[in-house]
Image (spheres, rainbow, N blue to C red):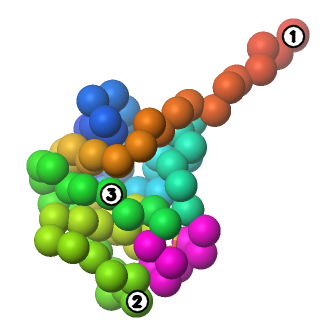
């Protein structure tokens, strides 16, 4: 596994080269849109601005430069642009 940087709408986070992007973004606390998680609906579509991914065959339509985060695995540092604000999940304080 290689450690990489994933930049999402200008925010950077640490990622890897073995997990689908959607899972990695969620694990980092982001809430990107999704529905099927299987390359069919296209809800997780975004623009790949820099870098490369391994994109599985999908049924959803993809324009040039677009990827589906549910079925793409980064191959190197990447930069993604979603055409909406991708917010972080509000984290609750935990009293120990
Ligand atoms: S969530 Fe449906 S194509 Fe990615």
Q: Which mark is residue 46?
A: 3
Residue position for label 2: 59
Q: Which mark is residue 21?
A: none
Judged from the image, the secondary structure of the residue bearing numbered disc 2 is loop
Q: Find the residue positioned furthest to the top.
A: 95
92 sits left or right of 71 in the view = right
64 sits left or right of 91 in the view = left
Q: Quadrant of the C terminus?
A: top right
Nearer to me, 11 or 96: 11
Residue occupying the point 55% across, 62% down: 34
Residue occupying the point 21% across, 55% down: 48
Residue 58 magenta-highlighted: no
Q: Where on the picture, by quarter, is residue 79?
A: top left
Q: Position of residue 15 (x, y in %)?
A: 36, 44
Q: Is residue 11 visible?
A: yes
Q: Where on the picture, by quarter, is residue 36?
A: bottom right
Q: Residues within 10 Å of mark 1 (few under 14, many from 20)?
A: few
Residue position for label 1: 96
Q: Position of residue 35 (x, y in %)?
A: 60, 68
Judged from the image, the secondary structure of the residue bearing numbered disc 1 is loop
């Amino acid at each position: 596994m290689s450690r990489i940087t994933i930049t999402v709408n200008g925010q950077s986070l640490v990622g890897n080269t073995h997990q689908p992007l959607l899972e990695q973004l969620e694990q980092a606390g982001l809430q990107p849109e999704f529905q099927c998680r299987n390359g069919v609906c296209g809800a997780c579509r975004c623009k790949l601005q820099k870098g490369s991914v391994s994109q599985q065959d999908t049924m959803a339509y993809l324009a040039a430069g677009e990827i589906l985060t549910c079925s793409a695995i980064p191959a190197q540092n990447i930069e993604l642009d979603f055409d909406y604000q991708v917010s972080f999940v509000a984290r609750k304080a935990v009293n120990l």
